[in-house]
Amino acid sequence: MKSFIKVAPDSHFPIQNLPYGIFSTVENPNPRVGVAIGDEILDLSVIHALIEKHVPELGQKPMIFKESSLNSFMSLGRPIWKAVRKCLQNILSADNSELRDDAELRAKAFVAQNLANMHLPAQIGDYTDFYASKEHATNVGTMFRGSDNALMPNWTHLPVGYHGRSSSVVVSGTALRRPCGQRLLAKNNPPVFGASIRLDFELEMAFIIGVGNELGNAIPINKANNHIFGVVLMNDWSGPFLGKNFGTSISPWVVTLDALEPFLVKGPEQKPEPLPYLRDNGPSAYNVQLEAKIKPYDSNAYKTVTRSNLKYMYWSFKQQIAHHTVGGCNMRPGDLCGTGTISGPSEGSRGSLLELTWNGQNEIDYDNGIKRKFIEDGDEVVLTGYCQGEGYIVGFGDCSGKILPAINSP
Amino acid sequence: MKSFIKVAPDSHFPIQNLPYGIFSTVENPNPRVGVAIGDEILDLSVIHALIEKHVPELGQKPMIFKESSLNSFMSLGRPIWKAVRKCLQNILSADNSELRDDAELRAKAFVAQNLANMHLPAQIGDYTDFYASKEHATNVGTMFRGSDNALMPNWTHLPVGYHGRSSSVVVSGTALRRPCGQRLLAKNNPPVFGASIRLDFELEMAFIIGVGNELGNAIPINKANNHIFGVVLMNDWSGPFLGKNFGTSISPWVVTLDALEPFLVKGPEQKPEPLPYLRDNGPSAYNVQLEAKIKPYDSNAYKTVTRSNLKYMYWSFKQQIAHHTVGGCNMRPGDLCGTGTISGPSEGSRGSLLELTWNGQNEIDYDNGIKRKFIEDGDEVVLTGYCQGEGYIVGFGDCSGKILPAINSP
Ligand SMILES: [Ca+2]
Ligand SMILES: [Ca+2]
Ligand SMILES: [Mg+2]
Ligand SMILES: [Mg+2]
Ligand code: NI
């Protein structure tokens, strides 16, 4: 499969991927729906009539690609997602003349990615952060409770998850302020007020709910995939003891579950066997190679500090959904579910500075003798991830963010 | 101050109150903005021109009262809220003929409350549940950690809060399903799957954010009230060990902070003195008498199981906002902040069955020999609350909900 749009061999966005995002441009500042192909964006609001022609099941929906989030499109469900994906692969294919040879339409329909502003892809109703990597949970547990009690007793029985703050989810590229709050200098002393001193990144991915469920009705595990639209990279920044509400960054391009299907692999063995509602006849892990790079403010170079993989995650997306809804909780289009920090089995695959420096005991060496335990003001963190196909890559692009100094106490 | 609309002496909704809500009717199923007065609703979408005439600062906003949530109106800020409140008190006053003597407009502008469907008043972006009652925290802490460690060490230093699930916030009157999940029958045994057996109510109130703040900028405590639009009753249903995402009920009428101002009182003394960013030159507690009634499925009578008061709350709304945003967290119009269960100093003022039965050790006696420890299928819980003025009441109406049987395992 090849597109008439030039796609470099190392591009994250070949015709096999076609992730969805929300973008705007200087000429047209209205955020709208686009699909990434090579270095370009195909503006779906411009070619909506072509899509409606090829996907009659979609009906006449001239507005759906003009909206400022993917929520309406995502709520249409997997059969429509699949049909639109097939249609776009068709329209973009090298041997289809429809768009290729229509110079006027082509000129309007493509926008260079480097001229576009990316926005949050979804209006996020609720954000849940799971804690689904056994290696991560074990590392953190070992640090704070010792190796004998590293995993909490329920950890192997269910995918633990926490509610997060949806208001502070931002798109890649948004700079964030170091948070302030109360801190204990010494046990039994009163807390003091100040800026977080141990700011960290968390290498995560997140899936976005396309189709929701009614309050009171669980989503059974064998139907869970029908509810997931796609997946993004996520940096769930943290400032220990000072809360986690100052920002969570996600990548702008939502890679669909359909594009990820060729990269399904078996996940970690689960022992003890989960209860029936969590039993998953795999493969349902995804082989996504992940990487975090940091550029210290006083350096010009990015250094890769960890390489991990989504396939290390213990609890699958499907298990996370089945558990999240089993008590009757309703999910809505646009809900965001983070994996939790994804650490792998080796020291070089730990997904946070907390683990990489082992609670600040070690330092990371950057270029020119620069050393860091945690993140300093002006430092930039970039997450990236991709699946290696045969002759092509299905990638997620970047999820980047820079930390700005704290604003002083109010 | 008296209205030309008849208001019974024990009505929760005299002209001194004027709470906002979202309602629809059989004749006009579009949810829209109304204000409660006596047993009626004044339909603001019908009289918007009259409001625009009296509140020139509002400008021409014909759509703002036709929306299906209060979010747009709330985002306009306190000066507009105050001006519209004054205008409505004027229009409704017994000696103003403008609406009173316009029979045609009156016929269109008023809807009987018992003919209206109430909807959620706000589109809730994020829901935070605080844990701000010292008596409640002490009761629960004593039960599970013993009286020596009842309060966690940070409890007296900051208003502890948790993210909640906004998707499952429902309006009063919505029936909810008993949740299912994993449960431990005995320590060190594997968990089993089943319906929650200790379902409980939590007597809470919640404030709704009107005006938000930018990510990275805290709201100082002396500005916090400018961000609060109003207050509702909240039942934060719980099913211990099985999560809390199956439902949170709120009352439909948002009582504004302006209507509550006459009921400001001094809150509990705070020792140790909070850090400067949390110092609050009171009075900033509100004297709201609260009550929870239960009607067991096998009885015809409601029994009051507890009487509490919002003024017992240790951390004020202002302190909750100052703390929530001090790390840079942004709040948005429609965000919901619960107080946590409000228990008072006496046994009869405990705000949950967990406390009232002291972890199931005691039973509550209802009529005809019916006894309960927790809530059974078909039982109904009604919260109510009001402020007693001189010759009038500023009330919150009811927040009710019934528990339906669990749907079996998926
Ligand atoms: Ca996390
Ligand atoms: Ca609660
Ligand atoms: Mg975060
Ligand atoms: Mg709840
Ligand atoms: Ni939320």
Image: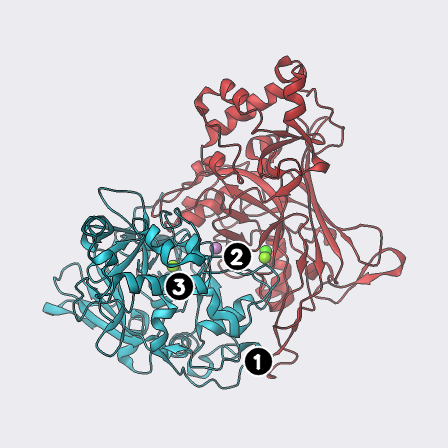
Chain colours: A cyan, B red
Q: Label 3: chain? A: A
Label 3 environment density (alpha carbons within 10 Å; few <14, some 14–19, many ≥20)? some
Q: Which residue is disc 2 drawn over?
A: B165
Indicate if the residue with disc 3 has its beta carbon within 8 Å of ligand 5: no
Q: CA distance from mark 1 to mark 3?
A: 35 Å
| Residue A12 appears in the rendering | yes
Q: Are marks 2 and 1 in contact (CB under 8 Å)?
A: no
Q: Quadrant of the C terminus of chain B?
A: bottom right
Indicate if the residue with disc 1 has its beta carbon within 8 Å of ligand 4: no
Whole-percent x and y of residue A95?
22, 66
Task: Write the residue at 43% across / 73% down.
Answer: A132
Q: Nearer the viewer, residue A150 or B94?
A: B94
Where residue B288 sits, quadrant-wise, is top right
Q: Which residue is disc 3 drawn over?
A: A83
- In front of the other: label 1 or label 3? 3
Q: CA distance from mark 2 to mark 1?
A: 24 Å
Q: Can marks 2 and 1 be said to lie on one chain? A: no
Q: CA distance from mark 3 to mark 2?
A: 33 Å
Q: Secondary structure at mark 2?
A: loop
**Left or right position of A113 against A240:** left
Q: Which residue is disc 1 drawn over?
A: A275
| Residue A375 appears in the rendering | no
